[in-house]
Amino acid sequence: MEYFVIPVTAFNQNCSLVWCKETGNAVIVDPGGEAKRLQKKIAMLEIVVKEIWLTHGHLDHVGAASELAKFYKVPIIGPHHNEKILMTSLPWQCQIFGMKIIQPLLPDRWLQNGEILKIGKTSFHVLHCPGHSPGHVVFWNKEKKFILMGDVLFNGRIGCTNLPGGNISTLLESIHRQILPLEDSTVFLPGHGLESTLGNERKTNPFLK
């Protein structure tokens, strides 16, 4: 597995290009915007986009999903179906933040907890982790001990819960039930900011004490 991170838009949201080294098959995870810039990098890497994966339905994570799905003629996968209300209210989200309107979006397929997604010969487990939003999922590569975390857990903090559908008790339960049982050496890429490890967050993150 290889991956390349491209922070996009004014939110500096970590869009990830993830691909199987053996086959060159790739997915775009959380394309929050700047579709043309992402297309240019994908062409430079000479990878073949097969799907778009979404961790959740906030505008900064899905802004370019429809445009890229049409360009590459690929399906949009995820998040969990509990995210439906949030994703159909994208125009309202944009109005709140004063952003260009993004049309309502529904994926080609919702995800369920425990599903396994494949990129070529690389597999990711789907973990439903509500709290930041109701249908948030994360993508865990067990073999490489790597998580595409979205906005559940960050380097030194946790996801915000002050947006519609957020709940801090639910978020902390998700982290303790789904994330922290994994190995300390597991590296994760959050939706914004720098990578960390679960071991580091277990020891230093004040929200997990």
Image: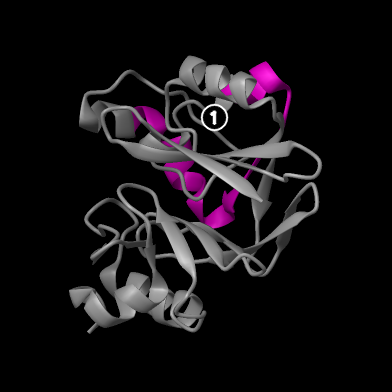
State the SS at label 1: helix
Quarter-wise, where is residue 175 in the image?
bottom left
Residue for point 49% across, 25% down: 64
Task: Indicate left or right for 36 with 164 as reference.
Answer: right
Q: Nearer the viewer, residue 95 or 77?
A: 77
- Residue 180 in the image, given as x and y percentages of width and height: 43, 80
Residue 4 visible in rendering: yes
Q: Quick check: is 87 in the magenta stretch?
A: yes
Residue for point 23% across, 77% down: 204
Vertical position of residue 119 compared to residue 159: above or below: above
Q: State the count of labels.
A: 1
Which quadrant is the C terminus positioned in? bottom left
Vertical position of residue 162 compared to residue 63: above or below: below
Q: Quick check: is 30 in the magenta stretch?
A: no
Q: Nearer the viewer, residue 117 or 96?
A: 117
Q: Residue furthest left?
A: 206
Residue for point 42% across, 26% down: 33
- Residue 125 in the image, given as x and y percentages of width and height: 65, 64
Magenta range? 68-92
Task: Indicate left or right for 165 with 34 as reference.
Answer: left
User: Of helix, strand and loop, which mostly describes the magenta segment?
Assistant: helix
Task: Indicate left or right for 90 with 162 as reference.
Answer: right
Q: Which residue is mark 1?
A: 65
Vertical position of residue 68 compared to residue 14: above or below: above
Q: Nearer the viewer, residue 89 or 100?
A: 100
Residue type beneath disc 1: Ala
- Residue 166 in the image, given as x and y percentages of width and height: 31, 59
- Residue 44 in the image, given as x and y percentages of width and height: 60, 21
Disc 1: CA contacts within 10 A as few (<14), some (14-19) or many (>=20) = many
Residue for point 62% across, 65% down: 144
Residue 107 visible in rendering: no
Quarter-wise, where is residue 197 in the image?
bottom left
